[in-house]
Amino acid sequence: MRIRIINRSSNELPTYSTEHAAGMDLRACLQEEIVLKPLERKLIPTGLFVEIPVGYEAQIRPRSGLALKKGITVLNSPGTIDADYRGEIGIILVNLSAEEFVIRNGERICQMVVAKHEKVEWELTEILEDTSRGEGGFGHTGKN
């Protein structure tokens, strides 16, 4: 699949880190570093603008290493970039650790996965088909 992209950053285009990776790393596009204090959230620019094909979305997801090692994750995760959005991709990062985290230009801050999606048409009804699960939810199947 080919996707049109504008790169207004000094960073390379999003890339897959390994041959079979599903997500591409996105990088921060900053004039100066940003300090993310504990429990603070900020919108981090990427300098990227994309033209996602109709029927697809770009999903923004945390990087597992940043989450585990530094407590940095993506709010509104997974975030969705719709096919009709043409603005700059911005990443909402939050610091869930007890220590400040410094974000520098070019730092890999999240992953982006391009995925196909379906459009639905609602069919109004008075009853739904029964299943063995029924209305059970929120841990009703137990711990194990």
Image: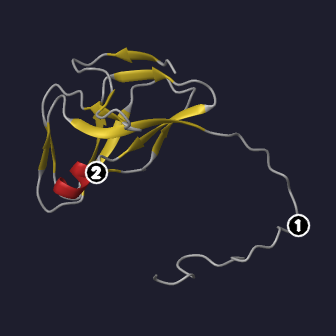
Query: Amino acid under label 1?
Result: Glu
Q: Nearer the viewer, residue 64 or 106?
A: 64
> Position of 97 compared to 55: left or right?
left
Circle 1: element type: loop
Among numbered discs 1 and 2, the one appearing first in the sequence: 2
- Number of residues whose C-alpha sits closer than 10 Å to that of mark 2, classed few (under 14), some (14–19) or many (20 or more): some
Q: Which residue does the image show at 14% across and 34% down from the upper left? A: 104
Quadrant housing residue 56: top right
Q: In the image shown, does 108 or 142 lie closer to the viewer?
A: 142
Q: Which residue lies furthest to the front in this view?
A: 19
Image location (x, y in percent) of residue 143? 46, 83
User: Dots 1 and 2: beta carbons under 8 Å?
Assistant: no
Which residue corresponds to the image point at 34% horizontal and 32% vertical from the top-left? 19
Query: Residue 12: x percent and y percent?
Result: 26, 20
Q: Say which element carries label 2.
A: helix
The colour scheme used to paint the residues is secondary structure
The answer to whether 109 appears left or right of 35 in the picture is right
- Horizontal side of 101 relative to 23 (left or right) equals left
Q: Which disc is residue 16 wearing? A: none
Q: Where residue 86 sits: x, y (%)?
A: 49, 22
Q: Residue at x 12, y 34 (%)?
A: 33
Closer to the eye: label 1 or 2: 2
The residue at which mark 1 appears reads as 126
Task: Name above or below for residue 65 compared with residue 33.
Answer: below
Q: Position of residue 123 (x, y in %)?
A: 85, 52
Pointer 1 local density, CA inside 10 Å: few below 14, some 14–19, many at least 20: few
The Cα–Cα distance between marks 1 and 2, rounded to whole angstroms, is 43 Å
Q: Residue furthest right?
A: 126
Residue, disc 2: 64
Looking at the rendered structure, the kind of residue marked 2 is Ser
Task: Kindly identify the residue that appears in the image at 39 percent across and 15 percent down.
Answer: 6
